[in-house]
Amino acid sequence: MTSRIEATFARCRAEGRAALVTYVMAGDPDPETSLKVLEALPRSGADIVEFGLPFTDPMADGPAIQAAGLRALKAGQNVAGTLDLVRRFRAGNAGTPVILMGYYNPIHTYGVERFLADAIGAGVDGLIVVDLPPEEDDELCLPALAKGLAFIRLATPTTDERRLPAVLANTAGFVYYVSITGITGTATPDFGRVSDAVARIRRHTDLPVVVGFGVKTGAHAAAIARGADGVVVGSALVDTLVRSLDADGRAQAGSVEAVSNLVRDLAEGVRAASA
């Protein structure tokens, strides 16, 4: 049976273009607005959505996503609430892949077996857990794969030829290449080096390679899309959402549309790269 992730990349390949992968934080700035944003992403041109699991100590994330997680936690967002948002999203969207992205602590606290069962029941397609290295695959990666959930691994500029096979060994769905050394949203990638890195990873795997960290505009997305199977944008969307909030951090009438407008620009960039 073809997964939603596989079907999406096959469709994008048939259209001669890269996939647009968009990240937002679950529960930011409140659960209901978060659901509206999630629902708007595919309508605006996103092919795959990553939904952040808020956590108090997000070590790989820059200031924008750290702040988004704190807003979500303040609004009462937790693992159960995040899975409920995915379940509600699925009621109106059966085709767009949903990837949960976050850290192991909330999942461990929730209970791995319970989490995997509830994630599958909600309609989750894959997991990105940034603080579980290959040496810890027994914790979550292998149980997730056994139940049909893709476990998506990060490769970075410092992942050398000796380390890469271990990173790819149990990766499924796609490989996420981190285009910069450091935290999210803090620098612009060197697009030439990114293309070379993607080519190097492709020599080791048949999985799609998507590129994220530092992509902020449609022009950035187009530059990445010329050499990758997918482009991930997160911090720029989170920044756009926060700029739309009122002085007390509450959503306003134009908040969802502000995010949608940026996604449309990114989608145009990705599609322009295939023209």
Image (cartoon, rainbow, N blue to C red):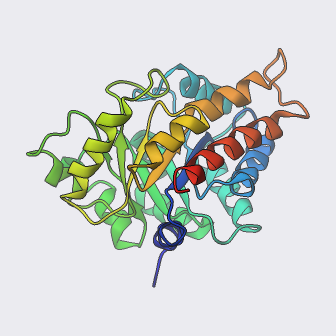
- In this view, 269 is above or below 84: above
Q: How many marks?
A: 0
> Which quarter of the picture shows residue 60?
top left
Q: Is residue 221 above or below residue 63?
A: below
Asked if residue 111 lies left or right of residue 64, the reply is: left
Residue 231 vs residue 249, the one in the foreground? 231
- Seen at 41% across and 44% down, the residue is 211
Image-based side of 169 in relation to 236, left or right: left
The picture places residue 171, in percent across and down from the top left corner, at 30, 59
Q: Position of residue 195 (x, y in %)?
A: 32, 43
Q: Residue 137, located in which quarter of the rendered image?
A: bottom left
Q: Position of residue 135 (x, y in %)?
A: 18, 48
| Residue furthest out toward the left | 162
User: On the picture, is 174 further left or further right than 230?
Assistant: left
Q: Is residue 214 above or below residue 267?
A: above
Q: Residue at x 42, y 40 (%)?
A: 105
Question: Can see residue 63?
Answer: yes
Residue 207 as seen in the image, left or right of residue 86 = left
Residue 137 in sight: no
The image quadrant where one finds the N terminus is: bottom left
Looking at the image, the residue that sits furthest to the bottom is 1
Q: Quadrant of the C terminus?
A: bottom right
Front position in the image: 45 or 154: 45
